[in-house]
Image (cartoon, grey):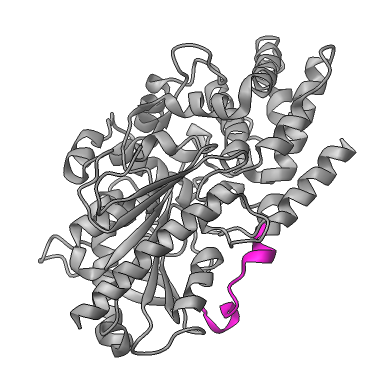
């Protein structure tokens, strides 16, 4: 265990991560704390959160209601009037500051202004502080895209006229990576290009390929060790030791068995997703004679330290908590709404060889949607894919980047869509979700560096083309 702890510390010290691609529920452990310490943008203290009055409904002229939407700006590197604007899309969690990591490094090189906009219904940008089912009619992808465009106009006309004369480039990772592609299609006049990192542009309802990708990235040995973890918890639960199992993760007492199985599957999947495969697999590779209690406590202790004690109790997994206005976490509930109503991405057990318990199927997710929001629901993913292209996006000047250990890559594109939509897959161990948003380091894997250089070639072209038009 000492070796594994040291290995984890060395792993964390080796990278500088973007903060905004880490889910809210995973921000309480050693992983996030290390990221926070390393990734603060240089001008953060001079860049407090600001707000603008965003229209509540961009598509109903009779609705004049607004809500305060947060944004951050870092002008430390900006050459006013000539440097571009690098515009980061906030995702399904609280926005913690202006763009950092690789985007900030690019800003230094291009004398760019850095801006990040918090997504509606997350963080402190919740209209009326109301997370009721009725108010969620204003939480849609198209409303979020309209926020991005309307804010751009607001900033150019009401805050900084110098931003109106320069090109804007959009950045997004994961769900915001999908938005960065959709935004280029819906509002192409507002930017000259975008980086879609691990962008989940293809809304897949029954996304069992997620689990299959985790297994493939882990390799046969580690995948079998994960199955030992799952089997140990299954035996404990069927032996009337469910309360004990939940206690290991500080889960609420009223959490259901399937909610719990979903939670532990997410815990191990996200470790691989976020480039921690090597350290995690070494930790759970226990002797064949290890008892179920040893297997369970080893995994639970590692997960609690890595993600934080609130990973289970934070309100993301417990259906009863998500449905209870006195207990719900707004960020968790808002993302549940988006998956249930529109974008889906339900992580389910595959037809064979599953790592997770087979009870975590599509029916489970749909039943959870109904219980949480008080009505039967089925996501409009077909309509979403029809509007924006799904695995074949209809945008232009979008660079798509994916990573071989990322289980979300199968919800992205699989190859260059067109000359105007290039693609790079970084194939390497511990190359996970949104890895190119992390600050570049001299020791990073060559496949990652290659992807950065490819993107920068397109970025330079987009900026040159924009300059030529002026």
For the point 53% across and 64% down, the residue is 102
* Quadrant containing the C terminus in the rendered view: bottom left
Give percent across and percent down for residue 288.
81, 13
**Residue 398, image quadrant:** bottom left
* Quadrant containing the N terminus in the rendered view: top right
Question: What's the magenta region?
Answer: 35-48
Of 326 and 177, which appears nearest the observer?
177
Furthest residue in direction left, as rendered: 62
Vertical comparison of 61 with 371: above or below: below
Q: Does residue 18 appear left or right of residue 191 in this picture?
A: right
Q: Does residue 10 appear left or right of residue 71 in this picture?
A: right
**Residue 396, image quadrant:** bottom left
Q: Does residue 339 appear left or right of residue 23 in this picture?
A: left
Vertical comparison of 253 with 91: above or below: above
**Quick check: can you spot residue 93?**
no
Of 210 and 146, which appears nearest the observer?
210
For the point 28% across and 86% down, the residue is 158
For the point 67% across and 56% down, the residue is 15
Q: Magenta includes 443?
A: no
**Quick check: can you spot residue 462?**
yes
Give percent across and percent down for residue 219.
62, 24
Q: Does residue 320 appear left or right of residue 12 in this picture?
A: left
Vertical comparison of 346 with 329: above or below: above
Of 107 and 97, which appears nearest the observer?
107
Give percent across and percent down for residue 24.
55, 51
Q: Magenta includes 38?
A: yes
Give percent across and percent down for residue 360.
48, 21
């Amino acid at each position: 265990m000492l070796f594994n702890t040291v290995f984890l510390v060395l792993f964390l010290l080796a990278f500088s991560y973007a903060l905004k691609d880490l889910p809210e529920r995973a921000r309480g452990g050693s992983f996030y704390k290390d990221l926070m310490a390393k990734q603060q943008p240089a001008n953060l203290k001079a860049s407090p959160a600001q707000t603008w009055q965003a229209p509540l409904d961009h598509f109903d002229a009779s609705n004049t209601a607004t809500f305060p939407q947060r944004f951050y700006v870092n002008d430390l590197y900006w050459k006013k009037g000539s440097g571009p604007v690098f515009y980061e899309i906030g995702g399904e969690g609280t926005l913690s500051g202006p763009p950092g990591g690789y985007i900030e490094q690019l800003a230094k090189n291009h004398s760019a202004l850095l801006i990040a906009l918090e997504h509606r219904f997350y963080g402190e940008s919740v209209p009326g502080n109301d997370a009721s089912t009725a108010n969620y009619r204003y939480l849609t992808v198209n409303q979020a895209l309209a926020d991005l465009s309307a804010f751009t106009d607001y900033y150019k006309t009401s805050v900084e006229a110098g931003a109106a004369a320069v090109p804007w480039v959009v950045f997004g990772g994961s769900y915001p990576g999908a938005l960065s592609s959709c935004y280029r299609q819906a509002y192409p006049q507002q930017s000259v290009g975008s980086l879609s990192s691990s962008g989940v542009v293809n809304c897949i309802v029954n996304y069992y390929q997620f689990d299959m990708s985790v297994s493939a990235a882990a390799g046969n040995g580690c995948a079998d060790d994960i199955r030992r973890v799952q089997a140990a918890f299954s035996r404990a639960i069927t032996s009337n030791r469910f309360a004990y199992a939940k206690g290991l993760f500080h889960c609420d007492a009223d959490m259901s068995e399937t909610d719990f199985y979903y939670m532990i599957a997410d815990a191990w999947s996200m470790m691989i997703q976020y480039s921690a495969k090597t350290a995690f697999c070494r930790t759970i590779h226990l002797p064949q004679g290890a008892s179920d209690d040893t297997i369970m406590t080893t995994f639970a202790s590692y997960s609690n330290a890595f993600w934080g004690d609130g990973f289970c109790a934070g309100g993301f997994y417990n259906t009863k908590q998500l449905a209870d206005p006195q207990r719900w976490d707004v960020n968790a509930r808002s993302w549940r709404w988006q998956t249930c109503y529109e974008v889906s991405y339900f992580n389910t057990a595959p037809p064979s060889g599953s790592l997770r318990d087979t009870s975590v199927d599509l029916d489970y997710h749909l039943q959870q949607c109904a219980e949480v929001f008080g009505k039967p629901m089925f996501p409009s993913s077909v309509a979403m894919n029809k509007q924006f292209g799904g695995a074949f996006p209809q945008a232009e000047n979008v660079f798509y980047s994916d990573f071989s250990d990322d289980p979300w890559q199968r919800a992205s594109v699989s190859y260059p869509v067109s000359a105007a939509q290039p693609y790079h897959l970084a194939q390497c161990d511990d190359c996970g979700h949104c890895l190119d948003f992390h600050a570049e380091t001299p020791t990073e894997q060559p496949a990652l560096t290659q992807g950065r250089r490819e993107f920068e070639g397109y970025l330079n072209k987009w900026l040159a083309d924009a300059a030529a038009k002026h």
